[in-house]
Image (cartoon, grey):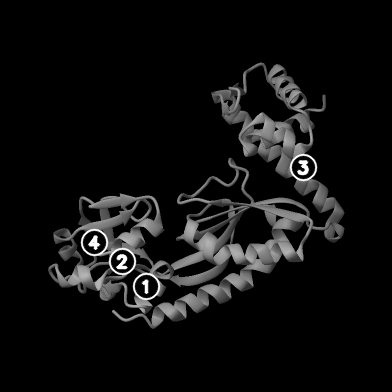
Amino acid sequence: MDRLEAMKVFVTALDEGSLAGAGRRLGRSPAAVSRAIAFLEQHVGAELLHRTTRTIKLSEAGERYAVACRRVLVELEEADLSAAGERAAPRGVLTITAPPISGEEILRPIITAYLDAFPGVSVNLLLLDRHANLVEEGIDIALRVAELPDSAMVAVRVGGDVKRVVAASPRYLAAHPRIVEPADLTKHSIVTTTHMGQDTWVFPPAPGSSIARSVHFKPRFLVNSVRAALGAAVDGHGVTRLYTYHVAERVQDGSLKLLLRDAEPAVLPVNLVMPQGRLTVPKVRTFVDFAAPRLKAEFARLSAEAGTMNS
């Protein structure tokens, strides 16, 4: 059996979450998929997958081997496409990750428009409230709202006016002490999301100081969903902290009021991020060329909308 083909079967099984799923995706029988995995295990001399009737789980050796397989397959694809040059048409599965709200509401319409324009490409969109390891998880592109550390990643800027803002409903504010400075938050019920800070929010230094202000709290409601936190705040259950594009509509319609406008952290950049070399792959290059100007326009619109929000 060809080892590269077996690697493709192995990686597909991981992406699909089962041997049966890999068989359906590749048009192979479950027995053929099992033989490919067994061939690799015999070749490396170690068990790669723990199998049950319905699921698979990587062994310790399998985790290391999966990273190497993905790297080999990506480099092989890049070599083929480099040789084909501009004649290579975009094709295959494009895997993208994004935060849930921006992925659903901002990126998803752009993806479906791209699919209409490029029928040879399919998209796998992963909505995650964490920063995935693009190489290890086989992801082509990530939409990220954050300062990016120095890394081997390539970033294309698509926005730069997103802020973290504090908000609460008028009903909640009418029944609780005023919030004038960040320290006042310790007297309030806090609705927070896991990625915004589970027990601490950090604000810029006060005027005349160089020390950032950290507010520590025991959350009244901690949730890993932006929509759930937003809904709880709108319903009057506490003060929350989210991105401007999360709350813009609710502030515009009066359901939420922004607080601590003078203590907002600096704006965050929005980037499309990808591993080094991926821009040479037609499906990645065409998506970035297609999506970047549309994302810039959409984030500019949201920034303008956020700029009209009253404090």
Contact check, label 1 and label 3, Cβ < 8 Å:
no
Q: Is disc 4 surrounded by few (<14), some (14 to 19) or many (20+) residues within 10 Å?
A: many
* Tally of numbered tags: 4
As drawn, 228 above or below 156? above
The reply to whether dot 4 and dot 1 touch (C-beta < 8 Å) is no
Marks 1 and 2, the one that precedes in the sequence? 2
Disc 3 target residue? 76
Q: In this view, does 16 lie to the left or right of 187?
A: right
The residue that disc 1 covers is: 250
Q: Which quadrant is home to the C terminus?
A: bottom left
Q: Residue type at mark 3?
A: Leu
Distance between mark 4 and mark 1 Cα atoms: 15 Å
x then y, percent, for residue 303: 45, 77
Residue 183 on image: x %, y %: 17, 63
Circle 4 residue: 238
| 180 left or right of 11 in image | left
Q: Counting residues from the N terminus, which is met first, the one under dot 1 or under dot 3?
A: 3
Image position, residue 83 (x, y; %): 85, 51
Q: Residues within 10 Å of mark 1 (few under 14, many from 20)?
A: some
- Amino acid type, residue under disc 4 in the picture: Gly
Distance between mark 4 and mark 3 Cα atoms? 52 Å
Q: Residue at x 75, y 25 (%)?
A: 36
Is residue 44 in view?
yes
Q: Name which residue type carries label 2.
A: Val
Under tag 3, what secondary structure? helix
Q: Horizontally, is 84 left or right of 153 in the view?
A: right
Q: Is mark 4 on a helix, strand or loop?
A: loop
Front residue (pair 104, 244): 104
Drawn side of residue 56 relative to residue 217, left or right = right
